[in-house]
Image (cartoon, rainbow, N blue to C red):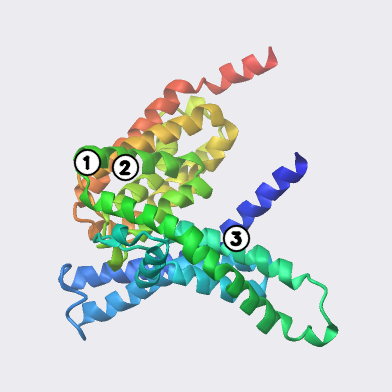
Amino acid sequence: MTFSKESLQTTKENLMTGVSYMIPFVTVGGIFLALAYAVGDTQAVFDNTGSLGWFLAQIGNAGLTLMVPVLGAYVAYAIGDRPALAPGFILSYLLQQNGVMAAAATVMGFSGATGTDAPLVAGYLGALIAGLLAGYVARFIKNLDTPESLDSLMPILIVPVATTAILAPVLLLFLGVPIALANQALTGFLQSMGTSQALGLGAIIGLMMAFDMGGPVNKVAYVFSVGLLSAESGMVAEPMAAAMIAGMTPPLGMALSNFVAPQKYPEEMYENAKSAVVLGFSFVTEGAIPYAASDPARVIPSLMVGSGVAGAASMAMEVSMPAPHGGIFVVPLSNSPLGFLGALALGSVVTAGMVTLLKPDVEESMETSEE
């Protein structure tokens, strides 16, 4: 049982290593793409070759294109060190190529499923699986007993080449195609869904963003939303707005509760509330963690409800956000700044109201503990 928990924790750390290396690509790519749409025609920015908007869009699209292979590469690196880096990157990159995956689907007998507008790519889930497998296979090969004459060739030739050769057919055909088909169906659904369906999606994104405040579940919702910003996905920017608003809501809602009902919190938490405001407006969900850690049973459900409401409201109003990060500072880039701020305010108030009703006063809590 202890081994299982340790393995789970190690896997989580490996995945978070990949996410931490990916975030700068997300930020650079998203900001430059948002600037491209701000200075140029949103519909034709990729067609106006040589214009300022076109160059900005190329930079932004490069960042958002590379972010998923980088995720897989550094998950592999965290497990198998440098010999696993190239296989992780190459395999993750191949899983994001529409032409390659369409050919693989044809080989597997799924050619009829590729005739939709949505790209056939494995997305971040495929990259995570590719990174994990590349890391473990590379580490296994690296630890094999080999002649000393091969020691210098192992990390730069034998391990990377053997890992890539072993995993390429497995990932491209047997794992990549089902994942890519599921991802294609989901993307196509998002591009064609109506308002009632958007409400459910926004609520789910909000719940996930608030559940672990920067942890793996939060990152799944975030990376999913960022992935829809790429040109290949048709620039679906509404889920990104829902994710950003839902990620800003927890620290702002807890700060509001702390300010309105200070008797519910220890005195030292008041200073934390001030910093939570700054973190919340900056889209740093982790600002709510001190509150959740001190009272998870009451705080986490309140955060999830507030963020779920905020995400649903954002999607219902069709608020979009072309930038993947920036919080309050990128609100002018939204198609509806007032809608963005309104959904954020609604979610924060719901969070604050629910947690304030659930939490007892500090003195009452201390008396109960003494008894």
Q: CA distance from mark 3 to mark 1?
A: 37 Å
Q: Nearer the viewer, residue 230 or 179?
A: 179
Q: Nearer the viewer, residue 245 or 91?
A: 91
Which is closer to the viewer, label 2 or label 3? Answer: 3
Q: Nearer the viewer, residue 5 or 135?
A: 135
Quadrant in the picture for residue 139: bottom right
The spot of residue 106 in percent (x, y) is: 37, 65
Left or right of 235, for residue 307: right
User: Which residue is under mark 1?
Assistant: 316
Q: CA distance from mark 2 to mark 1?
A: 8 Å
Q: Amino acid at mark 1?
A: Ala
Residue 227, above or below 341: below
Left or right of 186, for residue 126: right
The answer to whether marks 2 and 1 mark residues whose Cβ atoms lie closer than 8 Å is yes
Q: Nearer the viewer, residue 164 or 263?
A: 164
Q: Amino acid at mark 2?
A: Gly
Q: Which comes sooner in the sequence, label 2 or label 3? A: 3
Tell me which residue sits at (53%, 36%) in the image: 291
Q: Is residue 268 visible?
A: no
Residue 345, above or below 44: above
* Quadrant where the C terminus is found in the figure: top right
Residue 179, above or below 201: below
User: Which residue is under mark 3?
Assistant: 132
The answer to whether marks 3 and 1 mark residues whose Cβ atoms lie closer than 8 Å is no
Label 2 packing within 10 angstroms: few (<14), some (14-19), many (20+):
many
The spot of residue 340 in percent (x, y) is: 25, 48
User: Which residue is under mark 2?
Assistant: 202
The spot of residue 8 in percent (x, y) is: 66, 47
Q: Amino acid at mark 3?
A: Leu
